Image: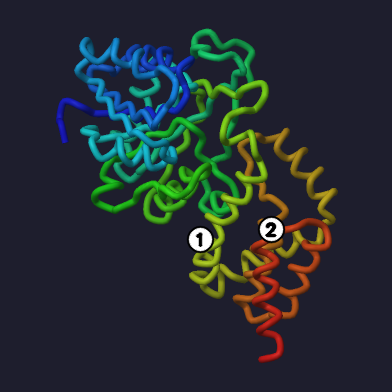
Amino acid sequence: MNRDILISAIVSTYNSEKFIRGKIEDLLNQTIISKTEIIIVNSGSVQNEEKIINEYLNSYPNIKYIRTEERETIYKAWNRGIKIASGKYITNANTDDRLKENAFEILADELDKNPDVALVHADMCVSDVPNQKFDEVSNSKVEIIPEFDYLVQLDRCLVFSQPMWRSSLHYKDNIWFKEDLKICGDHEFEINISQRYKIKHLRIPLGVFYLDKNRSNISHNNMLAVREEKLLITKDYIKKYVDSLNAEDLNHLKNRFVFLTKIPIPILRGINIIRIKLNPHIHRFTHEFVYYFTALLYKKSGNIKTAVNVCRKLLKIRKSDRVEELLAELENLMPKL
């Protein structure tokens, strides 16, 4: 590790020619740039990012550049960049997002002050204007993130696109991004971290998330694919969590979640909308998670018949591969009782 480098910012680019110059300039304008290195991983782009990147390489020795001939998943590109990173702290710097000029300084300071925190993140503004800088954003929507809770994290990603984390997670704890994932690998990474360490949320916007008007962002252009990968990622983590519960915690969670399954989904949806308007930082669970989790709680407590009924109740309303899979497993257990 280079002691002069505090932060390594990993920039993965694929067909991002219209954003790459603005991204590099945005990073170079960080107040803590003297302690920051920028690692750009060109993942087989067919556009002209390399020509733009080369304009900066000779003038800025703190910029490192890697190019792969073939396109890789973003998570393989991030791992590739991390492996040559020198910083104590690491952040992913998406080409189309922008940062408040002291964002790195604020995030790094939080990690410095809180040795028990492994990852820190903040709220962010949302803009549909390409290359819009943080100080140019006005009257934009601020994406307010609920406070971190491990159980909620098993249902939905609570860390958005601009976190910072300790590089020791990769080498000391062997936590890396799963390279076969295409969309939600950061969610899996953060769940993995939060099993062992604290994650801290700052209730201030420190960046701009670009959301294309046509929702061409990979995390928004196919919400079905996002949902399916998320459910695949979280399934085993949820089962592991339920299996680890003691009797007291099991009963507490059953009381909490069974109540939610008694409320008709349309009414529960309306209640959630009102609750979030009253308090944007409040936790809410998706309906699919509520039923899947409740069925697992019943299974853990040995009440297979009720677990089956919970699964069937959800499947009458909506499709869920993992609930269908759980239902088949439960039905195979019933004759043995």
Mark drawn on residue 104? none
Identity, as a three-letter code, of the amino acid under mark 1: Tyr
Rendered residue at 43%/43% (across/down):
199
Residue 45 in picture, x, y percent from top left: 42, 27
Residue 78 x/y as whole percent: 36, 37
Q: Earlier in the sequence, mark 2 or mark 1?
A: 1
Residue nearest the observer in this picture, 113 or 119:
119
Task: Assign a secondary structure to mark 1.
Answer: helix
Query: Could you say which quadrant of the image residue 9 lies in?
Result: top left
Q: Can you give x and y, in whole percent of width and height, for residue 333 in the image?
A: 66, 84
As drawn, the label of residue 237 is 1
| Front residue of 235 and 50 | 50
Residue 334 can be seen in this image: yes
Q: Is residue 19 left or right of residue 305?
A: left
Label 2, secondary structure: give it. helix
| Residue 208 relative to residue 271: left or right | left
